[in-house]
Image (tube, rainbow, N blue to C red):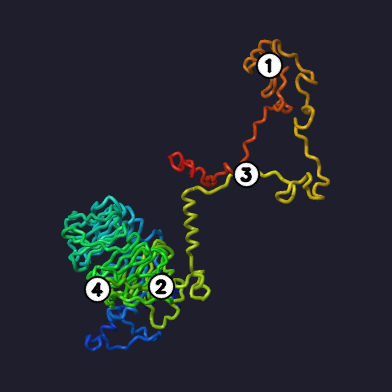
Amino acid sequence: MAYEPRGEHGGGGQDGTSMKARGRRPVTDYSSTVTHWLRNRVPNYKGSYNGEAERPSASYIVDMLPPAARPTNAADTIPIKHLHSSLNKIKHPINVVRWTPEGRRLLTASTSGEFTLWNGTGFNFETIMQAHDSAIRALEYSHSDDWLISGDHDGLIKYWQPNFNNVQSINAHSDPIRDLAFSPNDSKFVSASDDSTLKIFDFALGQMESKLEGHGWDAKSVDWHPTKGLLVSGSKDHLVKLWDPRTTRCLTTLHGHKSTITKVMFERVRGACLATSARDQTARVFDLRMMRDICLLKGHEKDISTLTFHPVHANLLTTGGMDGALFHYLLDSPNPPAGQPLTVAPYDSMDPSTTPAQSVWPMHRVPFAHDYAVWSLDWHPLGHILASGSNDRITRFWTRARPGDADVSQDRYHIGEAAAEAQGTWDRRGNRRQRQEEEQQEMEDEMDALVDQDATKLPAPSSLPGIPGLPLGGGSALPGLTAGLPPPPPIPGVGSSGPPPPPFPLPGLNGAPPPPLPGLDPNHPPDPAQLLEMMKKAGVPLPPPGALPPGLIPPMGAIPPPGNFPFPVPPPPMHTEENDTRRRAPLPSQEESLRQEQRQGKYTRAR
C-alpha cells in the first residue's frame, strides 16, 4: 500500500494564502510489486524467482510478491487487512460487486437499480448511473471483456458495453433473476430465476434457446464451467444439479445440503472442483471426477450467503455469512480447532468412494467484517484485493498484510469495536454511523411531516399517601394515618333522608313564580314544541334560552345553574388505557402544507 498526497503540506496557495494539509489517501498500487517480480523472475527449473525473500519487517515491503509469483503459496494471499470502506451518499444495500476485466475499477449494483463505479487503486467514488428500475440481482462480464449483462428483480436482462451504453433489453423471466453466467465462448448465457427454471439465451440474437426444468423451487444460483459444456445450479429445494446445455438433460443431482442453496461456483484454475454454500451453516466442495463431496467447510455460526474462489490459488476459498463474517479456507489444510479430530481426505484414504468428506475449518476469520449479511464477493483479476458487498450498504476492500503489520488481527473487524477501542486500535470518535442514522431519521420524519405524539391524558385525582395494597380507614388502617383527616363530603341522594335543598329559589317553590299556564299538568309536561304554542296563545313571554317555562319543575339531577344558563354539556369520557392509541399529529410549522397534501389525497389515512 502506498500513499497519494492530497493537497500541499506547508506550502502556499495560488493567491498567497496557506493551504490546509488534507492528509494522505491510502492507495493500493501493485505496479511496483509486479515490476519487481518481473525484474527478478527466472525460469521455473531455476527456482522461478531470484530476488530477496519476504521477512516480517517493514523494510521488506519492497520485496513483496504478487499472487501470480507464488501460485503454490496461498497462505500469503489471505486478505486479512481492511483497506477501505466505500459508501454512497444515498445508501442502499449492495447486492453484487464485480471488478472490471482490466481491474481498474469496481462495479457495484444496489437494490435501487444503480451502478456505482469505484476506483480500484484509491477506492474513491467515480460515477453512478441508474441502470434498472428495480433491484439489480446479478452481474456478469463476458470472457472476452467486451460485454456486461445484468438482471433485475423484475426479470429483465440488459446488455451493456464497457462504457455502460445500454444496447438491448430482454424480458427473460416473470420472476426475479438470481444469477447469470456466460458460456466459455461467450456465444450463450444462462439465467436462474425464482420461477424454478434455467434459461439458455443466444447472446447475439437475444432469444431464448432452451429451458432447463427440474428444480422444485426457486433457482438461486447458476454457473457455467470455464472450459466445458457443463452447467451447475442450486435451488431452494436443497439440491445441486448438473446439466448438459446441449440436450437440456439433468446429468446428476448432488445431495448433501439440508437447506436453501445460496451459491454455486466452479473452480477457475483447474476446473476440477465445484463449491456450494447453503443456509445450513456449511459449504461443500465437490470433485467433478468423483461426483462426490470431498470437503465440508465448517466454522460459521450463521447461514452462509456467498462464496468465491481465488483466481490464482485453486485451494483458497472465501465465504461470507449472514452475520457479516468473512472466513478464509485453505482446502488442503484442515486446521481443526482444539477438541476436534483430524479427518482424512478421500484422496488419502484406502477407499475414496466411501470415505466421508474431510472437515475443513477456516485458516483465518474476520468475524466483524460487516454489520449485516455479505451478499457478494469478488477478487481482483491479479488476486491481491478482495471486494465485499453487504446488506449494511457498505462496500469494503481487503488485502494481505504487509511485512511488519503486527496489529492487523487486533482491529475492530477481528475483535469488535468495544475490544478494539479498549486496546487502542480503533477510535470511536471517528465512527459517525450513529450520527448519520439519526440525521437520516430526522430527514424521514421531515418528509413525512408527521411526528409521534401521545394523546393528552387527564390528570389522575390526588390520593392520600399510603402503602400500596393497604386501604386507609377501617380496622386495617395503620395507627396515626387517619387521625385528623376531614370527613368526606356527602354524596347527594346517598345516606340522607331526602335530596339536599337547592342553593337558589326555583320557580314555583319558595320564590314568586308567575301563574302556571292554563291546562298544564306539572306532573306530565307536554312536548316542548306544544308547550311553546301554549305559551304563545296564553300571552306568556317566552323564557330565555336554557330556562324552564313557568310552573315546570325540573327533574332532580338536571337543575340549571343560576342566571338561566343552558344545561351543562356532559364531560368527555375518561381517557383510559383501553382506548389509548398512538396518534400522529402534524408538526405546527407544517400544518398548512399538510392540509394541501391532504387535499391532493395524500396523508389521509391514520398511520
337 vs 414, nearest the viewer:
337
Q: Is residue 312 above or below residue 172?
A: below
In contact (CB < 8 Å): disc 3 and disc 1: no
Per the model, the C-alpha gap separating discs 2 and 3 is 54 Å
Mark 4 neighbour density, 10 Å: few (under 14) some (14–19) many (20 or more):
some
Mark 3 neighbour density, 10 Å: few (under 14) some (14–19) many (20 or more):
few
User: Which residue, given by chain and number where applicable, does mark 2 sit on?
Assistant: 365
User: Which residue, given by chain and number where applicable, does mark 1 sit on?
Assistant: 524
| Residue 88 seen in render | no
Mark 4 or 1, nearer chain start: 4
Q: Residue 531, image x and y in percent?
A: 65, 15
Q: What secondary structure is found at the residue carrying circle 2? A: strand
User: Which residue, given by chain and number where applicable, does mark 3 sit on?
Assistant: 457
Q: What secondary structure is found at the residue carrying circle 4? A: loop
Q: What secondary structure is found at the residue carrying circle 3? A: loop
Mark 2 or 1, nearer chain start: 2
Mark 3 or 1, nearer chain start: 3
Per the model, the C-alpha gap separating discs 3 and 1 is 43 Å
User: Which residue, given by chain and number where applicable, does mark 4 sit on?
Assistant: 269
Mark 4 or 3, nearer chain start: 4
In contact (CB < 8 Å): disc 2 and disc 4: no
Q: Is residue 113 above or below residue 519?
A: below
Mark 2 belongs to which amino acid?
Answer: Arg
Q: Is residue 384 left or right of residue 451?
A: left
139 vs 325, nearest the viewer:
325
The quarter holding residue 403 reads bottom left
Of badges 2 and 3, the one in the foreground is 2
